[in-house]
């Protein structure tokens, strides 16, 4: 069955939380955080209210990406989270999700997009770089034009 991509729904929160919890914290923490982010009750620094989450499904959630409009670092958008199930890494799901959130940023007229990524997270930095992001500083990368997110 091919992977299906769509906007996240409230019923997807548990699956997204499970993916986040596989790396840090626990399901309860992430269920609460994602639900509050989705409704706008939780916002990162400099975040504006407009936000989106997209999921990748292969019978269950195998990945998701979240982003919002922002004023951080002179950017108009920020990629907040991206998580891919271990057995779907390297399959193109991450690139497809980055492309999808990039299209959402374009619809919002947000051109310059940033993402926080630890300088030690080589795999994530490679992914973002392969999807067109450039290094902004030690812990941030940036797309100067959201139209090219994922299209390199």
Image: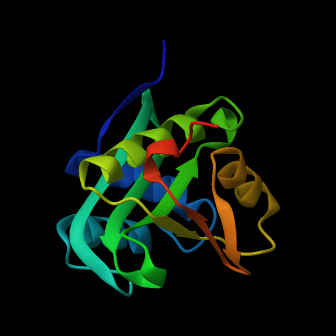
Report the colour scheme.
Answer: rainbow
Quarter containing the C terminus: top right
Query: In the displayed structure, would residue 148 be above or below residue 123?
Result: above
Q: Tell me where residue 97 appears, x and y as whole percent.
A: 48, 41
Q: Residue 139's spot in the image, x, y percent? A: 68, 79
Say which of 23 and 101 sits in front.
Answer: 101
- Which residue is located at x 48 percent, y 12 percent? 1
Left or right of 110? Residue 75 is: right
Quadrant in the rendering for residue 49? bottom left
Residue 90 screen position, x and y as percent: 72, 34
Q: Is residue 15 above or below residue 27?
A: above
The residue closer to the viewer here, 76 or 50, is 76
Residue 112 shown left or right of residue 110 in the figure: right
Q: Nearer the viewer, residue 52 or 84?
A: 52
Residue 58 percent across, percent down from the top left:
47, 26
Q: Residue at x 81, y 73 (%)?
A: 120
Q: Give the image quarter of residue 61.
A: top left
| Residue drawn at (71%, 45%) of the image | 130
Classify residue 22 as left or right of residue 130: left
Look at 48% across and 54% down and name the residue there: 145
Relative to 77, does residue 87 appear above or below in the rendering?
A: above
């Amino acid at each position: 069955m091919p992977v299906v991509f769509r906007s996240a729904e409230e019923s997807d929160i548990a699956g997204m939380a499970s993916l986040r919890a596989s790396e840090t914290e626990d399901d309860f923490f992430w269920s609460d955080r994602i639900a509050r982010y989705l409704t706008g009750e939780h916002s990162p620094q400099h975040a504006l209210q407009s936000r989106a989450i997209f999921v990748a499904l292969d019978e269950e959630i195998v990945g998701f990406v979240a982003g919002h409009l922002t004023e951080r670092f002179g950017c108009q958008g920020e990629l907040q989270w991206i998580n891919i199930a271990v057995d779907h890494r390297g399959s193109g799901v991450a690139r497809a999700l980055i492309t999808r959130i990039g299209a959402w940023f374009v619809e919002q007229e947000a051109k310059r997009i940033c993402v926080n990524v630890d300088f030690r997270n080589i795999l994530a930095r490679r992914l973002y770089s392969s999807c067109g992001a450039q290094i902004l500083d030690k812990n941030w990368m940036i797309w100067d034009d959201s139209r090219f997110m994922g299209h390199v």
